[in-house]
Image (cartoon, rainbow, N blue to C red):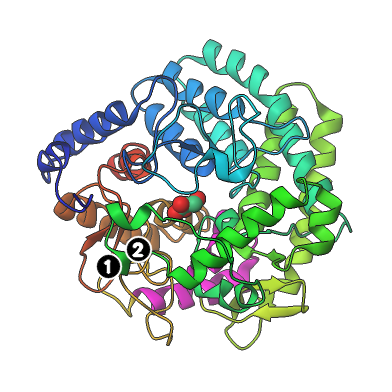
């Protein structure tokens, strides 16, 4: 059965805040596999990196010990070099492709993938600290997590920016978390399709029209095989991977996390590390000039194989607000752009500008609204004093989830719900943001 059919948890959803709160908590409890939360029961039956960070924010609203445990569980998969993998395979499950055996890392305990995801963990830890009622527990958990966060930030600088440009590269569209964004169409076309057979599982759970195309999966699989064949060697992958992209979203999220990590280091009495992180953040911020596109008047990603910008109007540009990149005039201009963009669809925020030729309102990252990205952008709007935009994003997120259920993503034109049902980060965003705003 497709996950689009309402589960019993979904059917309890009503407009009332209390009911939304209870439903969101019930979803997190139902998706709890004993210390880690699966994003959605069948579609994503393991622990994902950026899902875990956002899901921990949701747990923090009603079970602080469980929230910290989410991150402890994720870091069980951290590599010796600092990489936090994009999936940690704590327990076997056969409803997902590509599972642990595909990545060539079943000898690890727990097995993991060999790629990462948008680095938001330091920011989530900082937000969890700010929300904590049990400050003793927060201090104790942060003391354990901090060296691991520092190690992952050093890994980003060392392995993903070996030429010290200030911008980190991604080797797989899955690392962006925005798997099939039209921004990756050009660099992905340079990747050969795999010649081996494989069997997707995602389209057994969700309508294929809401998921990436086979042409994309052929290249997703080619890349994961390549990393295994190159023995996960950072220098060889940097030199040989045909897909090497500076993703604006990842860099914005990393910039924000680097400043948050610096704050955590200061609090913990690590002034040298805090200074180093601030210097790195400043280097990154200056390098963002390379990602500005004058025609679109927004930030875009960059294909480092060709040196060309990926000129696509993707909503990742507005993560610049979350990253605190704007000065006064650029904030005014970017928020005017955001207003125009919001005006093009009934529900904000479409992941691709709706008048773009590649816009598909139902296909994953090629148009749909994503609740957690709405939160990140709205948080940035509020930081710059644009509470009107914050409130609009929040109201649309609430309406979509209240009316359609706790789904993964939504059609910006009709509000139709798509992807995984009873979705963990959708529940977390309701708890952490929508019900608190
Ligand atoms: C998937 O399998 O669709 C995931 O997004 C990969 O992380």
Q: Is 325 colored magenta in this rendering?
A: yes
- Checking the image for residue 143, the label placed there is none
Image point 38% across, 40% down: which residue?
39
Q: Position of residue 203 (x, y in %)?
A: 33, 58
Q: Position of residue 420 (x, y in %)?
A: 30, 50
Q: Is residue 428 above or below residue 209?
A: above
Image point 53% across, 66% down: which residue?
218
Secondary structure of the residue carrying numbered label 2: loop
Does any portion of residue 361 appear in the rendered image? yes
Region of the chain picked out in magenta, as a range: 314-342
Q: Residues within 10 Å of mark 2 (few under 14, many from 20)?
A: many
Q: Position of residue 397 (x, y in %)?
A: 29, 55
Judged by its main secondary structure, the magenta piece is helix
Q: Is 231 colored magenta in this rendering?
A: no
- Say which of 315 and 265 sits in front: 315
**Mark 2 near ligand 1 (CB under 8 Å)?**
no
Left or right of 324 in this view: 98: left
Q: In the figure, residue 121 lies in which quadrant?
A: top right
Image point 28% across, 56% down: which residue?
206
Q: Which residue is mark 2?
A: 369
Q: Which residue is mark 1?
A: 411
Does any portion of residue 262 appear in the rendered image? no
Secondary structure of the residue carrying numbered label 1: loop
Q: Residues within 10 Å of mark 1 (few under 14, many from 20)?
A: many
The residues tagged by marks 2 and 1 sit, at their Cα atoms, a distance apart of: 6 Å
Image point 38% across, 71% down: which residue?
367
Q: Is residue 284 above or below residue 313?
A: above
Q: Position of residue 291 (x, y in %)?
A: 70, 72
Q: Are marks 2 and 1 in contact (CB under 8 Å)?
A: yes
């Amino acid at each position: 059965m497709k996950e689009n059919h309402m589960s019993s948890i979904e059917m309890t959803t009503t407009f009332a805040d209390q009911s939304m709160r209870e439903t969101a908590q019930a979803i997190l409890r139902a998706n709890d596999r004993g210390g880690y939360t699966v994003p959605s029961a069948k579609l994503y039956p393991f622990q994902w990196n950026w899902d875990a960070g956002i899901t921990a924010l949701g747990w923090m609203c009603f079970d602080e010990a469980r929230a910290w445990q989410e991150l402890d569980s994720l870091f069980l998969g951290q590599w010796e070099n600092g990489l936090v993998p994009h999936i940690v395979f704590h327990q076997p499950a056969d409803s997902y492709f590509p599972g642990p055996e595909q990545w060539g890392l079943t000898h690890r305990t727990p097995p993991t993938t060999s790629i990462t995801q948008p680095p938001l963990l330091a920011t989530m830890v900082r937000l969890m600290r700010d929300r904590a009622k049990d400050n003793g527990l927060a201090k104790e958990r942060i003391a354990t997590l901090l060296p691991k966060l520092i190690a992952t930030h050093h890994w980003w600088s060392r392995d993903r920016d070996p030429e010290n440009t200030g911008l980190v590269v991604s080797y797989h569209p899955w690392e962006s978390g925005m798997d099939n964004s039209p921004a990756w169409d050009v660099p992905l076309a340079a990747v050969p399709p795999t010649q081996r057979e494989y069997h997707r599982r995602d389209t057994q759970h969700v309508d294929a029209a809401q998921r990436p195309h086979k042409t994309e999966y052929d290249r997703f699989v080619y890349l994961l095989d390549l990393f295994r064949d190159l023995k996960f060697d950072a220098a060889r992958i940097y030199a040989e991977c045909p897909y090497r992209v500076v993703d604006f979203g990842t860099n914005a999220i990393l910039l924000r996390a680097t400043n948050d990590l610096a704050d955590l280091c200061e609090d913990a009495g690590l002034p040298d590390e805090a200074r180093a992180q601030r210097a790195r953040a400043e280097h990154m911020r200056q390098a963002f000039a390379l990602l500005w596109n004058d025609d679109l008047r927004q930030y875009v990603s960059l294909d480092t194989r060709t040196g060309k910008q990926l000129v696509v109007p993707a909503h990742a540009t507005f993560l610049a607000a979350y990253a605190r990149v704007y000065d006064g005039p650029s904030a005014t201009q970017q928020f005017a752009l955001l207003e125009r963009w919001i005006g093009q669809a009934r529900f904000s925020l479409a992941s691709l500008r709706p008048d773009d030729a590649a816009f598909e309102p139902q296909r994953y990252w090629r148009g749909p609204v994503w609740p957690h990205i709405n939160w990140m952008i709205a948080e940035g709007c509020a930081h710059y004093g644009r509470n009107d935009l914050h409130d609009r994003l929040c109201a649309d997120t609430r309406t979509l989830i209240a009316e359609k259920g706790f789904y993964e993503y939504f059609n910006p034109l009709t509000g139709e719900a798509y992807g995984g049902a009873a979705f963990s980060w959708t529940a977390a965003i309701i708890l952490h943001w929508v019900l608190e705003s």
